[in-house]
Amino acid sequence: MRGTRFFVLQMKDLIRVGIIALIGIILVILALVFLLPGRRGAAEQHEPGALARYIPGTYVSTIILNDEPVHVRVTVSAYEILEVYMTDMADVQRTFYPLFEPRMHDLAEEILRYQSAHINPQTDYPVTTGILQQAVISALELAHP
């Protein structure tokens, strides 16, 4: 039968292992910060002389519903999407297409959160959302320099 085992560790070994582990953690964090794509800091994004992502303004894309136009408007600054909304929807269109306004609201929230129209929105109405998303993408294409 085996008895209790005792391990004797010297303090210098513990300190050496701790320092190596700390350096390893720091290297992993630095690698993640520099190598993973993501939002850049505000100071880095708005540097003078940095290339703008958009030409500031409001851009319009049109959807035809029930033979009448509905406009999807996208307002952008030089570096971000500021507002996404739908205008000129008539009462007849609201009656025949009741999902367009709520889907536009949800899609606009996601676009503003991620600052991109190329997202995969989680929705139960993919066709309606796809039509609206394509209209936003068309408007944003007009905003590119």
Image: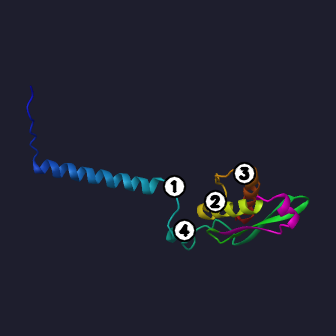
Q: Residues within 10 Å of mark 1 (few under 14, many from 20)?
A: few
Q: Is 23 located above or below residue 6 in the figure?
A: below
Secondary structure at numbered mark 1: loop
Please state which amino acid type lies under the numbered disc 4.
Gln
Alpha-carbon span between mark 4 and mark 2 = 15 Å
The residue mark sitting in front, 4 or 3, is 3
Mark 1 or mark 4, which is nearer the start of the sequence?
1
Secondary structure at numbered mark 3: loop
- Residue 58, given in percent of the width and then of the height, sits at 74, 71
The residue mark sitting in front, 4 or 2, is 2
Mark 1 or mark 2, which is nearer the start of the sequence?
1
54 and 117: which is toward the camera? 117
Q: Which residue is mark 1?
A: 37
The residue mark sitting in front, 3 or 1, is 3
Compared across the picture, whether 107 is left or right of 64 comes to left
The label on residue 125 is 3
Mark 3 or mark 4, which is nearer the start of the sequence?
4
Mark 2 or mark 4, which is nearer the start of the sequence?
4
- Residue 78, given in percent of the width and then of the height, sits at 64, 71
Q: Are marks 3 and 2 in contact (CB under 8 Å)?
A: no
